Amino acid sequence: MPEDKSQRVTINFEFRRQLDGIVGGDHHNYCYQCGACVAQCPAAQYNDSFNPRAILLDTLLGREDVLLTKDSPIWLCTNCYSCYERCPQDVRPIEIIVALKNLAVAKGVAPEAVATMTENITRAGVAGLITPAVQRIRERLGLEPLGEYPVEEMLKLLED
Amino acid sequence: MRLAPFYGCMIPIKYPQMEAAFRRTMPNLGVELVDLDGFTCCPDPIFFKTKGVLDWVTVAARNLCVAEENGIDLVTLCSGCTATLKEARFLLAEDESLKDRVNERLRKIGKEYKGTVKVEHAVVVIRDELGVEKLKESIVRPLTDLKVAIHYGCHLLKPSQIMHVDDADYPSILENLIRAIGATPVGHDRTLLCCGKGCMDDDMPTEMVFDIFTSIRDSGADVMGLICPTCFSSFDLGQIMVGRKKDTEFGIPVIYYFQLLGLAQGLAPEDIGLNLHKVKADKVLARLGAGTEAPPPAA
């Protein structure tokens, strides 16, 4: 019988090795596609295009073209950790999704909110702006005014 | 008992009423709060972690080092801070090579992470360290007949492998702490649903908030009680925004647990900043005899 070439699957191991290099990304190898992660996933309940098992399958195949895009399903994850709670294989699917997001950020295809929020933190040491209005509300509540945060020290840690 | 509060960003900047409530209620339970200098953002477990997990763990480890240098355990008020600091602690204990990499970075600022301090959310400290009896002793105005729909939020409980707080499917910690202040926890269909804030999409969180508040409205609860400022932002202003989109008005006040505790300990609503909430709790407060109006003159 001739080989049915349409059934051939190519696995991009190079992409998977890249994922292994991210903290928490290496557990994707443990996934046996049982789907326990889907049952309690709120994002899957609310949006048909989100399915953590399918994301893991694409990951196992190394489908970078599907996973690392601006409209990739990874951005729909609510970060609720239900999949981590459920997974019998310790895949920690949420951590795989976060590791994929790290690669997407490096590739320049993340939503703008990621850069905006992280820049806030690296500029001031905290998320959120400490305005005079904030200080006035604190004063009215009998709280001390907020001071400076050790930004310089934090930035030194971020230099690789 | 001495503990160092880790206030994070959202609470001191966006919702300082939560900080005020915490600072005014915890000493009544026999806790000495020791403010430490030198913390930064935990950093946030959604965006900062999305940018780079190693950076996220490293900055979290630096915050833990600050507590280690002072030899004092941390108490957190925000579920996000709790998630970040406890997960960082877990990862650094689990993976020796990660700890080495992080410490290599920390050396640049003269710090070393050792793993010697504990981190717990304040409600866990109350349950496990102080005890519900101690909580009951501090109550002067039990919130009798107040029906509270509890919202757990995700990061207090999950993953239980890291958080070690409660059964993630059948939790009871908040129900017990609500009962201890004289109020009545009210179950509803969406008690454990995520608030949706971590999702980088607009439609999904809207539907989640709508379903949560429809479920609470059906339950007959007076207020929603919660422990996380991120959930609070989804629900206080959030229910108004969602109500506009869906042409409905929920009008269900959202109250942080330590504000409820403050009311039960006899604090005035302004002392715990209830006046700052978008959805006002005035009706509920009047019924509890804790209205914002001046008390009637003595006879």
Image: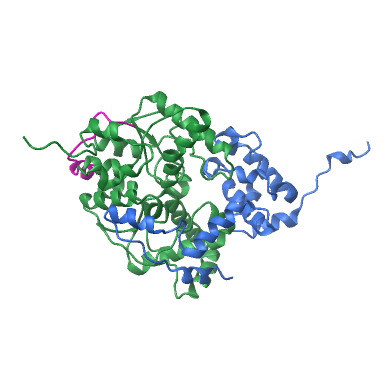
- Where is residue A84? Give x, y as percent: 54, 44
Can you name the residue that lies furthest to the left here? B299
Query: What residue sits 41% from the left and 46% below the top?
Result: B229
Number of numbered tags placed on the structure image: 0
B258, above or below B105, in the image = above
Quick check: B45 left or right of B147?
right
- Where is residue B194? Give x, y as percent: 49, 38
Q: Colour in which chain B is shown?
A: green
Quick check: B44 left or right of B148?
right
Q: Is residue A41 visible?
A: no
Quick check: B55 left or right of B67?
right
- Where is residue A8? Give x, y as percent: 84, 43
Position of the N terminus of chain B, as image quadrant, is bottom left
User: Which range is magenta?
Assistant: B131-148
Query: What residue sits 41% from the left and 26% below the top?
Result: B217
Colour approach in the figure? by chain
B59, above or below B223, in the image = below
Position of the C terminus of chain B, as image quadrant, is top left
Which quadrant of the structure image shows residue A44? top right
Query: What residue sits 48% from the left and 71% below the top?
Result: A152
- Where is residue A123? Give x, y as percent: 50, 64
Task: Tell me, yes or no, whether the highlighted magenta stretch contains residue B145.
Answer: yes
In the picture, one chain is blue; tell me its letter: A
Q: Is residue B294 visible?
A: yes
B70, above or below B73, in the image = below
Task: Tell me, yes or no, whether the highlighted magenta stretch contains residue B94.
Answer: no
Quick check: A122 left or right of B3?
right
Query: What residue sits 42% from the left and 29% below the top?
Result: B250
Can you name the residue that lies furthest to the right here? A2
Q: Nearer the viewer, residue B129 or A67?
A: A67
Q: Nearer the viewer, residue B226 or A3?
A: B226
Q: Nearer the viewer, residue B42 or B255?
A: B255
